[in-house]
Image (cartoon, grey):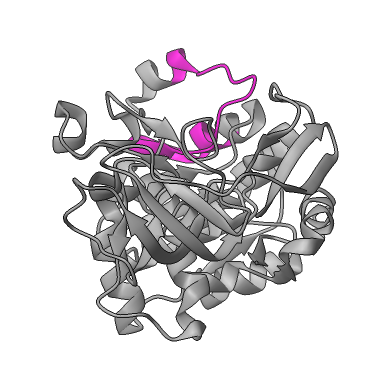
Amino acid sequence: MRATTIHAPFDVRLSEVPDPVISGPTDAVIKIVAGCICGSDLWSYRGENKITPGSRIGHEYVGIVQEVGSDVRTIKPGDFVVTPFVASDGTCPNCLAGYQSVCQNIVGIGSKDADGGQGEYAKVPYADGTLVATPEVPDDSLVPSLLTLSDVMGTGWHAARAARVKPGDTVVVVGDGAVGLCGVLAAVRMGAERVVALSRHEARQKIAKEFGATHIIAERGDEAKAAVLELTDGVGADAVLECVGTDQSFKTAFDIARAGSTVGFVGVPHGVEVPIRTMFSRNVGLAGGVAPARQYLPELMADVLSGAIDPGLVFDQELPLEEVAEGYKAMHERRAIKTLLRP
């Protein structure tokens, strides 16, 4: 079978790899219907994360179950499933508390024990604790939105939950990538009255508005702070969603948060210094981390299937798997927000 492998910075290839096989009683083998490239994949692509040459990459996909191990009970061959970006056993204390992303027996999708999602087939351990099946095989038009539930929509939702978004709030979203845009959608779905997207890019601004953003602020840094404070009569935002992970994005998030609010962070931190003195003096909280996408999947899947949300709009590029290298290049060069791949 074919799957995407990474060999060095800016070097991803479609390679021939062994077909997946059931090797444990909790395993499932999935025929991938659609996968995608994540913004976090770009850290490895750019060489900012350690690379194991020849390793598989990609952690978001949906597909059809082909085979299951002897202990699998909740899914069966023929089911259409969404695969969260980590495999979790569903039974450890952390999973039972709703934090499957910190499962005590966690397996990362795309690791040596769980195949990457940018290929034709994949094996998933802990199938019962990880995979969520749709009631029936969905129409192809729903595939992009269901695919977002493997990561970015659940991650945007986690940012809003961590920030304690509630009806009537003014929410500011820092970051206009797929996660930030899904954060806009999450805040709107949770009842926020005003949702402000910080974005300088017209295509991303357009999607933010389609998701319900009421205001767009194109400025950065001190100018962005001034614009938010002007919009909120000098008070600041009731909740801030930090969806980037840089020191500058964290600084902006805390600069625009009102006293007593919470910054919900889901951007993978790179070189961040948390402003603990600001948090102390202004009673601004910080919550978030790796999103437990599996926890949110049933609720978000119901919203997608009912038509209440359409997060698949974040995919502004669709390519055949053969062109995966171009998909990475397009996202790296910001010519694409998020690339969907079809085997």
**Residue at the image position 63 percent from the left and 68 percent from the top:** 315
**Residue at the image position 55 percent from the left and 39 percent from the top:** 110
Does residue 255 appear left or right of residue 281 in this picture? right
Does residue 269 show up magenta in the picture? yes
Number of callouts: 0
**Residue at the image position 61 percent from the left and 35 percent from the top:** 249
Camera-side residue of 99 and 62: 62
**Residue at the image position 21 percent from the left and 50 percent from the top:** 72
Can see residue 237?
no
Quarter of the image where the N terminus is located = bottom right
**Residue numbers of the magenta segment:** 252-278
Quarter of the image where the C terminus is located = bottom right
Does residue 17 show up magenta in the picture? no
Residue 203 higher or lower than 171, as above or below = below
Camera-side residue of 336 and 112: 112
Does residue 196 appear left or right of residue 320 in this picture? left
Q: Residue furthest top?
A: 277
Place residue 40 in its image quadrant: top right
| Residue 155: % across, % down | 43, 48
Camera-side residue of 84 and 229: 84
| Residue 30: % across, % down | 44, 58
Place residue 125 in its image quadrant: top left
Does residue 287 appear left or right of residue 196 in this picture? left
Can see residue 317?
yes
Camera-side residue of 147 and 131: 131
Residue 170 higher or lower than 207, as above or below = above
| Residue 296: % across, % down | 28, 54
